[in-house]
Amino acid sequence: MEKNTICLWYDKDAEAAARFYAKTFPDSAVGAIHRAPGDYPSGKAGEVLTVEFTVAGVACLGLNGGPMFKHNEAFSFQIATDDQDETDRYWNAIVGNGGQESACGWCKDKWGLLANHAARADRGVGGRRDEAKRAFDAMMSMKKIDVAAIKAARRG
């Protein structure tokens, strides 16, 4: 296990979530699955207690801790995409697997974890403040990111 690992609390679906992320994002994998050696407040001996996994190279630990804590907007995965096809692929995988749309490129998976698929449409804006503002304003009106629309807004 990494020295610093993001711990994500799930009710009972840590393994399913880890497998979904590993299937959806590159440089992602499911590692060790640890079963509870005895009964615990939200589960029984032998059930999956923790799952080690990576999401886009970031070490995570899924903990099946029960229903006490839910994911919220204070934490999210920020996934940079290279083009519209990659953005669409991730968006469709998350929303199409029981997730839901939000605004400005955000969507929430079926476990309540937010993801933002930021297409790199703002590359090269640098110090050109007017271009950056036009791109930002265009993005703020979107749900799923539309790379072509952001590029068009940058051009004016």
Image (tube, rainbow, N blue to C red):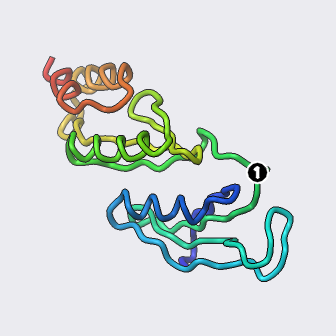
Q: Whole-percent x and y of residue 108?
A: 51, 40
Q: Whole-percent x and y of residue 86?
A: 25, 47
Camera-side residue of 42 and 115:
42
Q: Residue at x 79, y 77 (%)?
A: 45
Camera-side residue of 17 and 120:
17
Q: Residue at x 39, y 66 (%)?
A: 28
- Whether 64 is drawn above or below 153: the answer is below
Secondary structure at badge 1 equals loop
Q: Quadrant of the N terminus?
A: bottom right
Report whether 53 appears left or right of 140: right
Q: Residue furthest bottom?
A: 37
Q: Residues within 10 Å of mark 1 (few under 14, many from 20)?
A: few
Q: Residue at x 58, y 48 (%)?
A: 111
Report whether 101 appears left or right of 113: left
**Dot 1 amino acid type:** Pro
Question: How many numbered marks are there?
Answer: 1
Q: Whole-percent x and y of residue 156?
A: 15, 16
Report whether 83 appears left or right of 22: left
Q: Residue at x 71, y 73 (%)?
A: 47
Q: Residue furthest top?
A: 156
- Whether 52 is drawn above or below 19: the answer is below
- Residue 32: name its quadrant: bottom right
Q: Whole-percent x and y of residue 52?
A: 55, 73
Residue of label 1: 67
Camera-side residue of 75 and 41:
41
- Residue 42: name its quadrant: bottom right
